[in-house]
Each structure stands twice: as C-alpha cells, then as structure tokens.
Amino acid sequence: TVEEILTIEIKPGWKKGTKITFTDKGHDTRRGVIPADIVFIVDEKPHSVFKRDGDNLIVTQKVSLAEALTGHTAQLTALDGRNLSVSVDSIISQTHEEVVRGEGMPIQKEQSKKGNLIVKFSVKFPKLTPEQKTSIRMLLFIFILLFFLGNLDGTREKHHNVADIFVNAGC
C-alpha cells in the first residue's frame, strides 16, 4: 500500500455542493483495475451572525422602536474583521432592508467581485400598560393637533381633513 496526502485549497466563495475530484486516487483493490476517483463535496457550517444566500450575506439587526422611528446606525464586523457602519435615516419598518454592495461573499468565478451584504431589521416593540397606551394616544393627538393647526389656512376643508386624521389614527 502506498500512502498519499491529498491537499484541498478551499477558495473563498465556494458554495455548498462544490465538488473537488482527485482523478484515479481511489484505492486499487485489484491489480490491473484503474483506481476510482475520490470526490470531496463542500459543506457549509452555519455562522453565528451571517446567513448565506448565494453570493450575498444576510444579517439581522435588532433595533428599538425609538431607533426605528428616529434613525439608526448599525455597527457590524465583516467576515474579514473590518468594521462596517450602515446608517439609516428613514423610518425602519419590520420589512426594511439596507443593501451594502460588494460586502458579501467572493463570487466563485470572479474572485475580484463580491456579492452584497443585506441588513434586515427587527424592531423591538415595548410592552405597554393600558395607562401608557392612553398617554401615547394623548401625546400623538396633541402633536397632530399642533402640527395641523400650525399649517391651517382657515378653510373648512382643512379642518375636515384634520378630524379624519384623528379618527383614522384611533384618537
């Protein structure tokens, strides 16, 4: 028997299911028979922060309701150890995503290019007592009233729209 060490150089960006074949390196059990090929199939371990989707990486950031309403800067550590900041100045909904181009996985056939990093957001809503809910409704009512009173030009149509807004807002 002859021992041989086979070395596999795993390249960045290889996907689950990628096959590496060593031709004629299988064990020869009978003389005169060509040895079989040895085939290794790449598998992926789950990452604690990122999820892979093709060449893209997905990460979910938890944000408070206050951050969702007023803006948030997500601080992330890339797979290569670099620090990334992703700023969102708009209101963040449960379905909001930010795409950071070129910060995903290396593209297997074009190693100089990368997929994208997709930042998803999970908004943490506070648990409120009935008293807190009433207080928030009152504050919203006052805010809307002050906002629209400051923008009224004296027409009945505007007053009618303000009343509709209060009713639709549940105030």
Image (cartoon, helix red, strand yellow):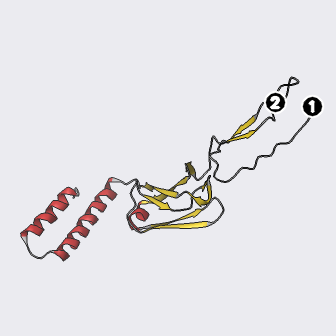
Snapshot quadrant of residue 166: bottom left
Quarter placement of the N terminus: top right
Would you place residue 151 above or below residue 98 in this image? Answer: below
Q: 170 or 7: which is nearer to us? A: 7
Q: 49 or 167: which is nearer to us? A: 49
Q: Earlier in the sequence, mark 1 or mark 2?
A: 1
Classed neighbour count for the residue bearing mark 2: other residues with Cα under 10 Å, few (<14), some (14–19), many (≥20): some
Mark nearest the camera among 1 and 2 is 2
Task: Give me the disc on residue 35.
Answer: 2
Would you place residue 41 above or below residue 90 in this image? Answer: above
Identify the secondary structure beneath mark 1. loop
Snapshot quadrant of residue 3: top right
Q: 143 or 9: which is nearer to us? A: 9
Q: Is residue 136 left or right of residue 100?
A: left
Residue 76 position, x and y percent, is: 57, 62
Residue furthest out toward the front:
32
| Residue at (80% x, 46% y) in the render | 7
Q: Is residue 54 left or right of residue 162?
A: right
Residue tagged by mark 1?
A: 1
Residue 41 position, x and y percent, is: 68, 39
The three-letter amino acid code for the residue at tag 2 is Pro
Snapshot quadrant of residue 18: top right
Residue 154 position, x and y percent, is: 9, 75
